Image (cartoon, rainbow, N blue to C red):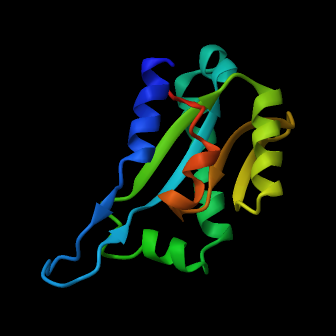
Amino acid sequence: MSADSAAVEAAEIEPDLRKGEEGGGEEAKEVVVQYVVLRRDLIDSWPMGSVVAQGCHAAVAAVWTHRDHPDTAAYCSDDNLNSMHKVTLEVKGEVQIRNLSEKLAGNGIDHKLWIEQPENIPTCIATRPYPRSQVASFFKKLKLCK
């Protein structure tokens, strides 16, 4: 297992819980996270700003499309707006990004596969915000994006 894979796996396995600000008897809440997956081949061949823009497009589209979902509302709430959690991962290329999108869709995981136009190139995926435990298993074999 690579160091990147081990780091992702450790981050996914380790419970990421936050106590309410009052502490006391409040129940711990699981962190809501958005996953963004980029294509490694584009990272190696496109300008970095262009690749970052692709991830931004997908992330905004996923949040906007699912803006009425309670997890998205929590993720974008005033209390969480300055402490959002994103995990940015990578896949090798177009085949892998399409396969991941199909796997997510087949399992009912809401996401946006960003297709850059007018070239019609699938560039990245972003999930809507989810409690980490609900989606981490779909991403555990992917490397952190560097």
Residue at (23% x, 71% y) in the render: 19
- The residue nearer to you, when weighing 141 against 119, is 141
Above or below for 97 versus 24: above
Task: Specify whether residue 37 is in view.
Answer: yes
Task: Specify whether residue 146 is in view.
Answer: no
Above or below for 41 versus 94: above
In this rendering, the count of numbered labels is 0
Residue 42's quadrant in the figure? top right
Residue 10's quadrant in the figure? top left
Is 98 left, or right, of 128 in this rendering? right
Is 91 left, or right, of 49 in this rendering? right
Above or below for 79 versus 2: below
Above or below for 134 versus 76: above
Is 93 left, or right, of 138 in this rendering? right
Is 67 left, or right, of 12 in this rendering? right
Residue at (27% x, 66% y) in the render: 18
Residue at (45% x, 24% y) in the render: 4
Percent coordinates x, y for residue 24 in the rendering: 12, 82
Residue 77's quadrant in the figure? bottom left
Residue at (45% x, 35% y) in the render: 8
Percent coordinates x, y for residue 116 in the rendering: 77, 40
* Extreme-bottom residue of the structure: 25
Percent coordinates x, y for residue 119 in the rendering: 85, 33
Percent coordinates x, y for residue 13 in the rendering: 43, 46
- The residue nearer to you, when weighing 121 against 25, is 25
